[in-house]
Image: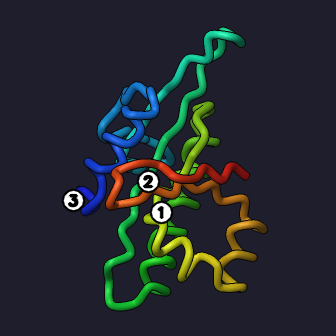
Amino acid sequence: MARDLFHQLVREALEADEWTITHDPFVLKSGGLRMEVDLAAEQVFAAERETEQIVIEVKSFIGKSKLNDFYEAKGQYDLYRRGLRKEGIQRKLYLAIDVDIFESFFQKTLIAETLEEESISLIVYEISTKRIVQWITR
C-alpha cells in the first residue's frame, strides 16, 4: 500500500513523544483479508509498570473532496477496528489527522457527531512543528 503523505511526520512526532514504533506498517490478518495499518507503537508508563499499545491510521485529507476522504478514512477505521477486535488484538486504534483539517472539517456538526457516536479516537498533529498537539481517546 502507498504511504500517506504525512506518514513519516506522524512517526517522528510519536517518537519525539517517547513512543516506540513497533510496526511500520502493522499487518492485520482477519476474516480472510490482509490489511496494513500505517503504524503501531507502544509506550511504557514506569509509574504503573504498564505498556500502552496503539495502532494508527494516518490520513492527509488532500483529495478534491474532504467528505470523500472522510468516507474512505472512516471505512478503513471501521474495518481495522473490527479486525483488531475479531483477532483479540488489544491495541487502541487512532486516526491521525492534521490540526487544520481537525479545526475546519472535523468540527462540522455531522462529522463531530459521527466521531463521538462511533467512538473514533484521533491523534491531531501539526505539520509545521511536526508534533502531536492533541489526543482524543474515545
Sort mark 2 into few (<14), some (14-19) or many (20+) by Cα contacts within 10 Å: many
**Real-space CA distance between mark 1 and mark 2, rounded to the nearest whole angstrom:** 8 Å
Q: Considering the numbered disc 3 on the image, is that residue within a helix, a strand or a loop? A: loop
Q: 106 or 129: nearer the eye?
A: 129
Q: What residue is at 69 percent from the left and 11 percent from the top?
A: 47
Q: 57 or 27: nearer the eye?
A: 57
Sort mark 1 into few (<14), some (14-19) or many (20+) by Cα contacts within 10 Å: some
| Outermost residue, left side | 2
Q: Quadrant of residue 64?
A: bottom left
Residue ID for mark 1: 76
Cβ atoms at labels 1 and 3 below 8 Å apart: no
Quarter of the picture containing the N terminus is: bottom left
Q: What residue is at 59 percent from the left and 76 percent from the top?
A: 106
Q: Earlier in the sequence, mark 1 or mark 3?
A: 3
Amino acid under label 3? Answer: Ala
Q: What residue is at 72 percent from the left and 65 percent from the top?
A: 118
Q: Position of residue 32 (x, y in %)?
A: 43, 48
Left or right, residue 93 beside residue 118: left
**Real-space CA distance between mark 2 and mark 3, rounded to the nearest whole angstrom:** 12 Å
Q: Quadrant of residue 6?
A: bottom left
- Mark 1, mark 2: which one is toward the viewer? 2
Residue ID for mark 3: 2
Q: Considering the numbered disc 1 on the image, is that residue within a helix, a strand or a loop? A: helix
Left or right, residue 93 beside residue 100: right
Q: Position of residue 40 (x, y in %)?
A: 43, 36
Cβ atoms at labels 1 and 2 below 8 Å apart: yes
**Real-space CA distance between mark 1 and mark 3, rounded to the nearest whole angstrom:** 14 Å
Q: Earlier in the sequence, mark 1 or mark 2?
A: 2
Q: What residue is at 38 percent from the left and 34 percent from the top?
A: 16
Residue 57 - label: 2
Amino acid under label 1? Answer: Gln
Q: Earlier in the sequence, mark 2 or mark 3?
A: 3
